[in-house]
Image (spheres, rainbow, N blue to C red):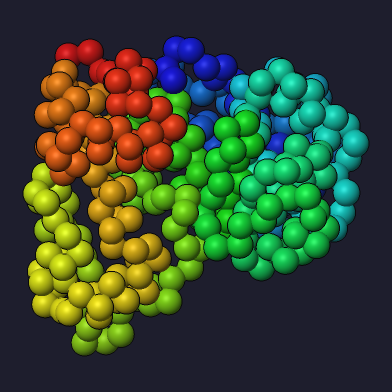
Amino acid sequence: MTGVFNRRLVAVAYDGLCSFEIGVASELFGLPRPELGVEWYDYEVVSVDPGPIRTLGGMTVFAPTDLTRIEAAGTVVLPGWRDPQELPPPALLKALQVANERGSRIMSICSGVFILAASGLLDGQMATTHWHYTDLLASMYPDIDVQPDVLYVDNGATLTSAGSAAGIDLGLHLIRRDYGAAIANQVARRLIVAPHRSGGQAQFVSTPVPPTGEVSMASTLSWAIEHLAESLTVADLADQAAMSPRTFARRFRDEMGVAPHRWLVQQRVGLAQRLLETTMKPIDVVAAESGFVSAPTLRHHFLRATKTTPTGYRASFRVPS
């Protein structure tokens, strides 16, 4: 949360670096953002290998090789790894273990989970990676509870994402943890990406683009977002889309990668977050305006989604008027 957490964030580079993944980390956490009006992350890159290091895209990168800089970071980002079956350098694993002991969060993107797994910090925890690597991760590290069909997993101190683009979703999730939904939405808007995809959403969807002649869910989703305060049901959404509830639920899952009821809850939690950040409306009013009807129902869903209560969230992220 703003002003409380350790803002120092270190991304780990290596020879054979995944250029997209390090770009994701740099764009999310390293780009100056004075327009947000908050103290942003103190970002730096350190390298496992002496420079210049080569990226998969043919570029060369220079970065300091003092891995002890990882140990005092508030957050460490592992943007991929060059070979899942190559054991990372002992100095890197040791630095991650020390950082973890000191309370650092460690976030991996795609194959970066294999570095985190080799450190032992995922033993007994859930984790994910790109679907191409999930079987290999499970066989190499049987003590890890591998989740093969989610976008990301947040264990608190360790965070893992699926394919490269899911690193953007996890990064925005982390920004939301640190700065609140309003700031995360502004960063997403700057990137021109969806402000929030739940970690439990499927890694890929059956129908990412509707067949020619079929109408996508876009208009129905827009309508639903404008009517979140109402007691919407899946049947209401189906009526709006001019489909039977059964057909609508199937099409929605195929196109969106998540069940319609779960999507509705996600949107309502997001609206409640914005209301808590930007207004001082009583909790029961926030509940009503975000479609949860009652304060207890809001608290139940809000706690499940954010791991904190509406009151606790407001205390952390309320934006002074």
- At which x and y percent is residue 193? 36, 51
Residue ID at (67%, 56%) = 146
For this rendering, which residue is in front, 195 or 145?
145
- Left or right of 8 in this view: 88: right
Query: Could you tell me which quadrant the N terminus lies in?
Result: top left
- Left or right of 98 in this view: 228: left
Residue ID at (26%, 18%) = 319
Residue ID at (77%, 64%) = 136
- At which x and y percent is residue 257? 40, 65
- Dividing the picture into quadrants, the one containing residue 130 is bottom right
- Left or right of 250 in this view: 242: left
- At which x and y percent is residue 260? 28, 62
- Dividing the picture into quadrants, the one containing residue 164 is bottom right
- Asked if residue 31 can be seen in this view, the reply is yes
Residue ID at (14%, 48%) = 228
Q: Residue furthest front?
A: 296
The image shows residue 281, relative to residue 290, as above or below, that is above
- Asked if residue 112 can be seen in this view, the reply is no
- Dividing the picture into quadrants, the one containing residue 181 is top left
